[in-house]
Amino acid sequence: MDNNEIWVYVETTGSKIEPTSLQLITKAKAIADGRKVVAVVPETSSINAETTVKEYGPDQIKTLVDDHFAHATDEEIADALFQVTDKNRPDSLLFPATILGRSIAPRLQAKLGTGLTGDCLDIYYQDGLLVQVKPTYGDNVMCDIVCPDRRPQMVTVRPNTFRAEKGTGGATEIVQSKFTFHKEANSEVVATDPIINSSSKLDDAKVVIALGRGAYSDKNIKLAQDLAAKLGGMVGVSRPLTDEPEFSHDDQIGIGGASLSADLLINLGISGAVQYTVGIKNAKKIVSVNIDKDAPIFDESDFAYVGDVTDFLNALLKQVR
Amino acid sequence: MKIVVGIKQVPETDSVKIDPKTNNLERSGIQGIINPFDKNAIEAALQLRDQAGGEVVLLSMGPDSYTSSLRDGMAMGADKAVLVSSRAFGGADTLATGYTLAKAVESIGDVDLVLFGRQSVDADTGQVGPIVAEFLSVPQVTFAETVSLESENTIIAKRQLDSAVQDIKLTLPAVITVRKELNNPRYETPVNMKESFEKPITVWTEADLNLDPSQIGQAGSPTSVTNVYAPTKEVKKTTILPEDPVQAVSELLGKLD
């Protein structure tokens, strides 16, 4: 049996609620057009994520409560979701394209025998179908994908593609879903180490100083770090610099890396390949510095400085209070 | 230990563009290569084989031209390859592809471990590994950054989530998808390249696999692509700052506040 509902998977790790899930609740409400927006929340008994989720105004919250979720494997989470999804299939089911979302959603897809489009950059309804907009070929090409006959229509959506907004009015019904947590015999999370600095993720940083190939030098790295410290921001890099010893994949902006939501982004020596610019679309103010006046990055920028990165950084460090 | 590595042949992505007038994909004359992330999976398989013995079997689904990637993978050191190839598989989306590959793994038989790259660089879905794991009813670790044999039939793999690092213990058989950071893939050597032409590539069609015809190819694919186009670019109104860095910065700070 199908229903006319949009479900959003709310990812929780420890007591933290994945921001992308909240962004998806806001988006689901915006495109719902009469459909009911339901947040699905697997959690342990001590988290009570529904208190926070409620503020974003879904029509209903379904909680799946079991203390095993503290250390659940992909198989166990997918199995729990299958139990609540299969019999009363929603029209659409949205996941954050986080590591966990991208791991669970396809397993659930195979259990349900339906379609899933990964890493979407937009979703909207047209003629009753969820149009799933997905980049391919390193974001050089966009595809519109639909799942005409099977339900739910599943997607994962890239973090920070949409903004989360707290909802107004409308009561949220909270329902505890019945399911049984099935322990998977052949896999087990034997250790979970929290990442200490996860609060300072690039995706969520308010100020980002980004370095590219054209700015790579010991001096510029130091200046960029000083500036980031002064502005309460973080240093990120374009993909080529992740191969250098000072940086890793975790510092990468763009495809396969961070999608920024910064209020201020300063690009230093970054030319502006599509693989990079896809990660900066939601930065509010963009300043770019490049020696090449024709660098494509300037097309994406609010402010352009054609000249030397070191000179610009020195001047900026002096003048910023 | 019998290890299957799923690989995909992809175009060199940076050169694939959309013709702005016709909205057609321009990919003529572009050479196919092994999906770069898959080389990390092959390397991981070779290291496990060197440690535990056994064999590494490459598996791919696609047209005959995919044999060139399979040869490249065998030149890295894999022992043999299976290509699942037939018109009946055409138009497969991730679900149909995952189903078909799972059936091929069953036909290879007695497989302990199936490895994949974290995602393909052309479609970027990363879905096929978990779908294969589900169809095989085996556990998975995705985006693994370390993989170590713990005993004859258990592996511990590390995976980094957004706020935690997990150690996951798998009892084989299992599926693992690997991150680029896991290892540095070895280069093909001239001797291995020569030998790769003596190693067997088995080609299977739907007749060779024990599968449900309604679950393969276009018929088995719930999704369809309705539109392909170039991304639209919003051109921003850009303020060009003066040439002198000190003046540039003061103008910038004045306008940002």
Image (cartoon, rainbow, N blue to C red):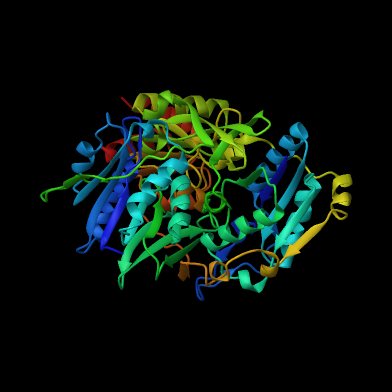
Residue drawn at x 77%, y 46% is: B78
Quadrant where the C terminus of chain B sits is: top left
Quadrant where the N terminus of chain B sits is: top right
- Depth check, front residue: A232 or A94: A94
Residue drawn at x 51%, y 28% is: A221
Residue B50: percent from left, percent from top: 77, 34
Please indicate, yes or no, whether residue B180 appears anywhere in the rendered image: yes
- Depth check, front residue: B30 or B247: B30
Residue drawn at x 16%, y 47% is: A173
Q: Is residue A231 left or right of residue A226?
A: left
- Depth check, front residue: B246 or B169: B169
All told, the count of numbered labels is 0
Residue A287: percent from left, percent from top: 39, 42
Please indicate, yes or no, whether residue A258 appears anywhere in the rendered image: no
Residue A94: percent from left, percent from top: 35, 53
Residue A276: percent from left, percent from top: 49, 47
The part of the image, by quadrant, that contains residue A27 is bottom left
- Depth check, front residue: B241 or B33: B33
Hey, which residue is sitting farthest bottom in the picture?
Answer: B22
Q: Is residue B128 left or right of residue A156?
A: right
Q: Is residue A207 left or right of residue A164?
A: right
The part of the image, by quadrant, that contains residue A29 is bottom left
Above or below: residue B152 compared with residue A40: above
Residue drawn at x 54%, y 57% is: B123
The part of the image, by quadrant, that contains residue B89 is bottom right
